[in-house]
Image (cartoon, grey):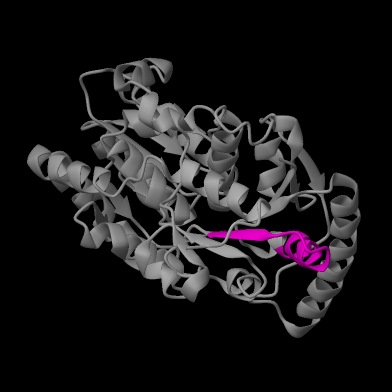
């Protein structure tokens, strides 16, 4: 089945679609697609390009630009870029001749979704968050179906909605914790805290962790994914630590394949509450301290509330992080019973076959099957 896929800007728009594509290719019973049948369409310089470069799927770039938060001049430029990108996407559609298109949102997805509409190619839209952003709201009007991770999100899309769960990499379910810790040179019998701020990192989280680094490392091993901007500063901080603490501090600018063992190895995760947290943390049963990004609209707050209401996470406000992060961390590390309860609550939210469900929906729209 010839398929085109689009989405990007953050890993949260990329990794769910990759999981669905892997499920599509792995479905030997239906022989739905081969890796060579799939083309990802993204932006020229987005994070999605780097991620796709590590996969078996082909990649093509088109012009695009943001509308949310843009000033009038930038908005006009973005409209022009989207129009240009749509023409570029039309040429790709005519050459690739897809039977279906999968889009995961973000302004990156607009040109291909519009091109699919113009060439009468059915579109499956996937919403990873609890609430749709501007691009998803607009593209839902032309989508054949809208897959959503969670039942409350279905209300935005009426009869087009199908609840699939959040698709994650199968390796998150299959990787052994002992093996994960060995891959990252972590001790097996001491707590592990994973800190991550998304594809580009989170400066406020990095700074709060750095301020309490000595105290934290006395209690736990730390895997810190800083993002590229703060990596050098945190590496320098590591070099000033006593040798026994520096050995417990594992600092990375970004993790690709190693992100799976990092998540599996963690006893506690500190993170923003982008869409990926809703699937990856439940998959590994990881308790979390979530810090919604204050400039991301409401969706990160809704994502965080979803896990907090389930008992799987504690939510801290970004503006109070400096005072509250370390005490909250230490309180949880000193309370194994609460961590165990949070882990069970997180795992209860996991949907292990979500990737397969989305792959099945993609096949269904390609075949012209009616939505129940």
- Picture layout, residue 117 above or below residue 277: below
Q: Is residue 350 left or right of residue 153?
A: left
Q: Residue at x 57, y 53 (%)?
A: 13
Number of numbered markers:
0
Q: Residue at x 54, y 63 (%)?
A: 146
**Position of residue 200 in the picture relative to residue 316 (left or right):** right
Relative vertical location of residue 93 with respect to residue 105 in this rendering, above or below:
above
Question: With respect to residue 76, does 210 lie above or below?
Answer: above
Residue 282 screen position, x and y as percent: 32, 44
State yes or no: residue 50 in magenta. Answer: no
Instruction: Identify the image quadrant of residue 51.
Output: top right
**Image quarter of the N terminus:** top right
Q: Position of residue 249 (x, y in %)?
A: 38, 28
Question: Is residue 240 visible from the viewing direction of this image?
Answer: no
Q: Position of residue 151 (x, y in %)?
A: 36, 64
The stretch in magenta equals: 110-126
| Residue at x-position 40% and y-position 43% | 280
Nearer to us in this view, 296 or 225:
296
With 117 as the anchor, is 326 left or right in this view?
Answer: left
User: Between 165 and 295, which is closer to the camera in this rendering?
Assistant: 165
Residue 368, placed above or below residue 295: above
Res 226 visible: yes
Residue 181, image x, y percentages: 35, 20
């Amino acid at each position: 089945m010839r398929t085109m896929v689009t989405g990007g800007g953050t890993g949260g728009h990329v990794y769910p679609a990759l999981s669905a594509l892997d499920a599509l290719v792995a479905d030997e019973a239906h022989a739905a697609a081969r890796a060579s049948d799939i083309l990802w369409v993204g932006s020229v310089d987005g994070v999605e390009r780097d991620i796709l470069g590590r996969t078996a799927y082909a990649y093509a770039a088109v012009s695009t630009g943001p509308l949310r938060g843009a000033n009038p001049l930038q908005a006009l430029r973005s409209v022009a870029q989207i129009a240009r990108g749509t023409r570029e996407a039309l040429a790709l559609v005519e050459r690739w001749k897809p039977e279906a298109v999968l889009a995961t949102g973000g302004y990156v997805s607009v040109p291909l979704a519009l091109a699919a509409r113009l060439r009468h190619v059915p579109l499956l839209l996937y919403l990873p968050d609890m609430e749709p952003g501007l691009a998803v709201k607009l593209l839902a009007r032309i989508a054949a179906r809208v897959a959503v991770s969670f039942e409350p999100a279905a209300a935005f899309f009426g009869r087009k909605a199908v609840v699939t769960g959040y698709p994650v990499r199968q390796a998150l379910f299959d990787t052994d914790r002992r093996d994960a810790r060995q891959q990252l040179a972590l001790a097996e019998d001491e707590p592990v805290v994973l800190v991550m701020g998304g594809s580009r990192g989170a400066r406020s989280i990095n700074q709060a962790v750095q301020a309490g680094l000595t105290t934290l490392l006395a209690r736990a091993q730390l895997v810190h994914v800083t993002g590229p901007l703060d990596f050098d500063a945190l590496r320098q901080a590591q070099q000033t630590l006593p040798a026994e603490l520096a050995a417990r501090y594992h600092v990375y600018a970004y993790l690709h394949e190693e992100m799976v063992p990092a998540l599996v190895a963690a006893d506690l995760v500190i993170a923003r509450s982008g869409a990926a947290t809703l699937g990856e943390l439940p998959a590994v049963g990881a308790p979390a301290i979530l810090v919604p990004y204050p400039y991301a609209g409401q969706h990160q707050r809704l994502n965080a509330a979803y896990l907090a209401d389930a008992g799987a996470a504690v939510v801290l406000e970004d503006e109070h992080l400096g005072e509250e992060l370390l005490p909250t961390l230490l309180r949880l590390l000193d309370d194994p019973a609460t961590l165990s309860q949070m882990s069970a609550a997180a795992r209860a939210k996991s949907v292990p076959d979500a990737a397969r469900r989305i792959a099945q929906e993609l096949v269904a729209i390609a075949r012209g099957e009616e939505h129940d």
